[in-house]
Amino acid sequence: MENHYFSRRNTGGANLSSGIGYQDNVGLLYLFKNIDKAEFKYITFETYDDFTIIYESYELCVQVKKTPFSFSSVKDILSKGYNEKYEDTEKKYKLISSLSDSNFSELLNKLEQFQNARKTYRTNQEILDIENKFKQIVIKTGIDYEKFMRIEFEIIPLDYIAEAIKFNMYKWAEGNKLQVEIDDLFDKLTAKISNYLRTKRGALNYNDIEIIARKCTKKNNEVIKRQHFYDSSTSSIIIALNRDIDEQKHFSDKLKFIKLYIETYNYDEAQKLAEEIYPFNDNFKYYHIWVLYKLGKQTDIMNICDNLIKENKCMYYALYYKGTVLLEAKEYEQAIDCLLHANQIQNTYDVNLKIGKLYQIAEKRDESLKHYNCCLQLDNTDANLYLEMSNLLPDTKAIEYLDNAIRLDPTLYKAYFQKGKILRYYGMSQDAYKYFNKYLEHKKDDIECFKEISLCLLNMNDDKAHYYLNDWLKEIIFTEDFSLIQDGKSICIVDVMWNKIQNIICVKQDEDFIIITPISEYILHSSSNNEIGIGYITDGFIKMSKEFFKKHGSIIEVGEEFIPCITKLYSTKKEFNKIFSKIQIDNSIKLNKDYNIELGNNQTSRFREYIDTKNVTSIIIDEFLNDMHVKVTIGKIVITGWFKKDGEGYFVFRSKIENPSGFSEAVVVLGCIEPREEVHIKFDIGNIKIKKSVVYDRENYVGDIVLPLD
């Protein structure tokens, strides 16, 4: 045989087969992403494209390439017979590859930024300018811009696609209450696509999938309840005491008192009685050690257990409690040794559970799962066991175990959080968002959950992301570790999903940071002592008029009027100036008056008043369960903050919005607490929009400040 027989240049068949296998997997992934959509009809293979998904009103045509996306490869794909194809308005087109080179990835990131810019509060001219800049970038690559913009590109990594398919299969099966063996369904569908549908240009619809799925039915496991062998729980010792009270008549009175003392948490008295009777029976030794364990007398327990082991008496309990004490002391190797010996004497749920946890700590996944599975064989009704095991399993299986945990115990909130993390990793951000909010019903101020929610919202292109983003970013960037970072230097936080990467870049600017996300840019200030309020304020113009006429000997009856206002107070002059210096005072906002007001006690307040002449100021108020979030836009500047829905001010504000007769203006008040200084910016009351949203209670939230860059 010639030496070059196995060389790379002679492996075309293997490469082709690998490429077709990837193509089939992408088709299967898209099938289960779309199968439950009402408009989905069927999927076809190897027609004009690698596969096509037929919807009621349009077709999604997909080309799959295992080779990397690059400027030259994409240019080549678009130039081969696609001139008329991509002009069909009843079709949508997508190109998918397993990877991309860095240059094309950067182009896709800029495309996403351009698309997100269209959704922000920008003028048509600004959006047009951004589009023209992006168009020039594409043209420089040699790619036809018009064709490029008609196609959606996606990267689906080869290494993770099988797991992603099984994950979507499981989600579909659970949603349709089908008990399906996922691996079996995956194998059957893969074989059907590869061996028949692709070669015959066949199709699959919902009924076809369901018929195949019902042939992969999972066997229903019987519910197994634990055969009790006494452990360190209170319920366990009560069961043992009840048994011995019935059987040990000579000791029943003392046993009854031990039970009473345990039930009333009087462990000292229980210990005295247990010490009196423990020499007479092995079970009584268990009571004695149990009470010592509750009293935290680890040294006494170790001495008793060592003596019992030397005498070869009550070996299971001696080894079990010695192992338990060593586990709590973090003497993991010795603890495993003791508990493994106990397990040889009696294969119990509790010993296997502790050994499973010890191996998990030691990062010995297979050994840990071995003992956790023994627990399942002894008792499959423990929700916490399913939660523990989910951390050691592939995501498809982990989701199944988390669902079991939630079914067994709907109050096991950690399971909702864990499931949300997996859903978010696979791009199911809306579903993940629901599970994270369920978790927050139990733990309202969890920074880690705020982080997950903000990343969900970023992936959904929802600008509410920064409400949660600022919570956990402040915990990272405003610390001693980052206090010495020089101006202009950045921190990059990378969020990795199975087929996508999101970057959050934090650039140091004075004491603050510029936060750059896929959907926005804004400044996060180091201070968190600012407050926001909502209500009404005395109209400065009419008040000035009243004082003016009074000085000249005239009196006017109506000297005051109250108008709706949003108030943002800053604790220092420095913060106040940062905000005000960035507001564009140009032709759109007209300066009306700059004066001082006497406050009494030799105090004055500097007061500047502006009028919005071109409706560039707007206020959006998101109304949640117990709180409100305000977003004030003045030109390109955004100022945000939270306030609670209590007090008369808010309701007066609402009544003036709802009954605007006589109230055509509102005002934004920026105030510096010390020294006293204010800026009033008036605008049309019609620019205030109030939206309702059902989100968790923000009762402990400290207000944030957000300023987009120009």
Image (spheres, rainbow, N blue to C red):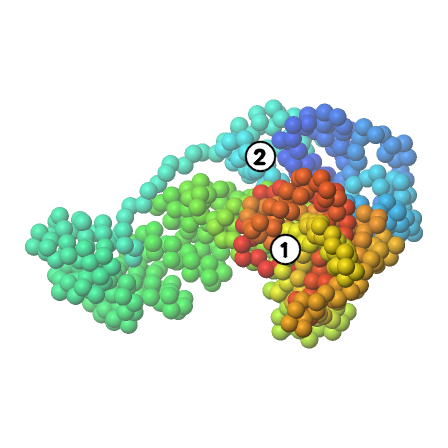
Which tag, 1 or 2, sits closer to the chain's start?
Answer: 2
Residue at 32%, 45% (x, y): give it. 226
* In this rendering, position of residue 209 left or right of residue 381: right
Residue at 64%, 52% (x, y): give it. 534
**Residue 556 x %, y %:** 74, 52
- 211 and 464: which one is in front? 464
Could you tell me which secondary element the residue under label 2 belongs to? helix
Say the numbered circle drawn on residue 533. 1
Residue at 13%, 62% (x, y): give it. 277
What's the residue type where badge 2 is placed? Trp
In the image, is residue 70 above or below residue 191? below
- The residue singled out by tag 2 in the image is 172
Could you tell me which secondary element the residue under label 1 belongs to? strand
* In this rendering, position of residue 497 left or right of residue 284: right
- 658 and 512: which one is in front? 658
What's the residue type where badge 1 is placed? Gly
**Residue 679 x %, y %:** 75, 60
Is residue 693 visible in the rendered structure shown here? Answer: yes
Given the current orientation, which residue lies at the most extreme left position? 250
**Residue 309 x %, y %:** 24, 66
**Residue 552 x %, y %:** 79, 60
Residues at discs 1 and 2 in contact (Cβ within 8 Å):
no
For label 2, count other residues whose C-alpha is less than 10 Å away and answer few (under 14), some (14-19) or many (20+). Answer: some
Residues at marks 1 and 2, CA–CA distance in whole angstroms: 46 Å
Given the current orientation, which residue lies at the most extreme front position? 553
Residue 156 image-quadrant placement: top right
Quarter holding the C terminus? bottom right
